[in-house]
Image (tube, grey):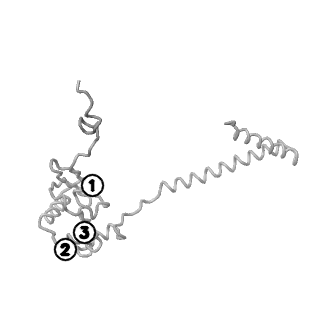
Amino acid sequence: RDLHYPLRRQRQMCIRDRYQRRVRGGFNPVIHISGIMADKVADKATDKATDKEAEQKKKRTFRKFTYRGVDLDNLLDLNNEQLMELFPSRARRRFQRFVGTKNVNLIKKIRKAKKEAPPNERPEVVKTHLRNAIIVPEMIGSIVGVYNGKTFNSVEIKAEMIGHYLGEFSICYKPVKHGRPGIGATHSSRFIPLK
């Protein structure tokens, strides 16, 4: 079968249509050229319309962050009981059973670092071993050095992190990069001569 059959068929259809237009209405080159000019004018008009649409898209507003239907400004105004109602069950249980002085001290240090930071500057890094501390809206914008067992990884707290643990953002193991299997790893590898 011919690989160029679809192209050849398309060419034949195009030639046939041209022939039928000439036979039926008579081919008038002036009308044909004016039709082309009209098409070009119409194309320019559509190009201008698409340019305007592109400009409007550039000016689009970013969607506001909401946590479970509550926007960020209102989240910061909520007290602990109202905030707990928004959190998932595991975080609610954690706050009900054990808040602890360590978590409270961490939030105090974060507040202090934010207050001491000059305007439009990042606050100082607050180092902590509390990988199990739950991120609350008050921490947003601060930088926390989360201990991973060896070093303190700096984590900038963002709005999307609310309700997660600090430890989720400081990986404490080195992900496995699988190489070639060692000797004795498979049955076939035992029979390779060691020369």
Kindly tell me whether residue 114 is visible in this rendering.
yes
Against 71, residue 188 (above or below) is: above
* Disc nearer the start of the sequence (1/2): 2
Residue that badge 3 annotates: 90
Q: CA distance from mark 3 to mark 2?
A: 10 Å
Residue 128 in the image: x percent, y percent? 15, 56
Q: Which residue is depicted at the point 17% across and 52% down?
A: 147
Q: Which residue is depicted at the point 24% across and 68% down?
A: 91
- Give the quadrant of residue 29: top right
Tally of marks = 3
Amino acid carrying mark 1 in the image? Asn
Query: Mark 1 or 2, which is nearer the eye?
Result: 2
Q: Contact, CB < 8 Å: mark 1 with mark 3?
A: no
Amino acid carrying mark 3 in the image? Arg
Q: Is residue 13 left or right of residue 154?
A: right
Kindly tell me whether residue 124 is visible in this rendering.
no
- Asked whether 187 or 112 is in front, the reply is 187
- Asked whether 48 or 108 is in front, the reply is 108
Viewport quadrant of the C terminus:
top left
Amino acid carrying mark 2 in the image? Gln
Badge 1 element: loop
Residue 82 in the image: x percent, y percent? 27, 75
Q: Is residue 18 left or right of residue 172?
A: right
Q: CA distance from mark 1 to mark 2?
A: 36 Å
Viewport quadrant of the N terminus:
top right
Q: Which residue is depicted at the point 69% across and 50% down?
A: 42
Residue that badge 1 annotates: 120
Q: Extreme left residue here?
A: 101
* Disc nearer the start of the sequence (3/2): 3
Badge 2 element: helix
Residue that badge 2 annotates: 96
